[in-house]
């Protein structure tokens, strides 16, 4: 059996069936496919993903580095001793109202997306969303009135979730 001639600098070992196996020396030699093509094929999916993440169709002007930053003054409100709401509707009893101060410590407007009392407590702690602004200007603050009127005696606690676009 005549041995096939390997290109200069390539060492081949014959295998059964007429195939040749490359030695480790051949792995260091140039590929028949230009390396630039291999690199570009490997880079292309990453480039497409990067472009899709950068693309943006925004309304209005965006200032680089500008963002709102939410700060809640006093992370706990205490309503003190409060009388339960009477069962007789003819007896007047006003709820106790406390204000929670939200401050925008950022350098752009802060959008308040959601103010929500935890489920099962919303009838006891009422946030009048109509009295809360949708946005808080940079450096400004807003008061969020929260009314509390318990239905029975005892200690009552609840969480208020405030969601803003501060991307913290």
Image (cartoon, rainbow, N blue to C red):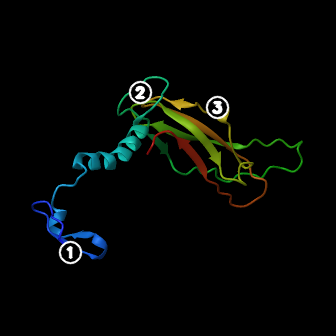
Between tags 3 and 1, which lies in front?
A: 1
Local secondary structure at mark 3: helix
Query: Label 2, on which residue?
Result: 62
Image quadrant holding the N terminus, namely bottom left
Which residue is depicted at the point 18% across and 66% down?
4
Find residue 27 and report its horizontal and vertical position in percent.
Answer: 19, 64
Between tags 2 and 1, which lies in front?
A: 1
Most distant residue in the front direction: 1
Q: CA distance from mark 2 to mark 1?
A: 75 Å
Residue 64's place in the image compared with 13, above or below, is above
Query: Label 1, on which residue?
Result: 1
Question: Which of the marked residues, 3 or 1, is nearer the chain's N terminus?
Answer: 1
Image quadrant holding the C terminus, namely top left
Question: Which of the marked residues, 2 or 1, is nearer the chain's N terminus?
Answer: 1
Query: Label 3, on which residue?
Result: 131
Q: Is residue 78 left or right of residue 13?
A: right
């Amino acid at each position: 059996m005549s041995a096939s001639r390997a290109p200069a600098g390539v060492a081949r070992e014959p295998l059964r069936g007429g195939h040749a196996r490359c030695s480790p020396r051949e792995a260091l030699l140039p590929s028949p496919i230009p390396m630039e093509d291999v690199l570009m094929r490997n880079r292309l999916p990453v480039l497409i993903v990067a472009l899709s993440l950068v693309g943006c169709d925004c309304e209005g002007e965006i200032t680089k580095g500008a963002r709102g930053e939410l700060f809640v003054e006093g992370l706990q409100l205490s309503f003190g001793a409060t009388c339960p709401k009477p069962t007789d509707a003819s007896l007047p009893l006003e709820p106790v109202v406390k204000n929670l101060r939200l401050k925008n410590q950022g350098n752009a407007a802060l959008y308040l997306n959601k103010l929500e009392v935890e489920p099962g407590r919303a009838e006891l702690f009422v946030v009048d969303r109509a009295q809360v602004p949708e946005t808080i200007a940079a450096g400004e603050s807003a008061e969020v009135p929260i009314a509390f009127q318990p239905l029975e005696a005892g200690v009552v606690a609840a969480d208020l979730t405030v969601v803003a676009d501060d991307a913290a």
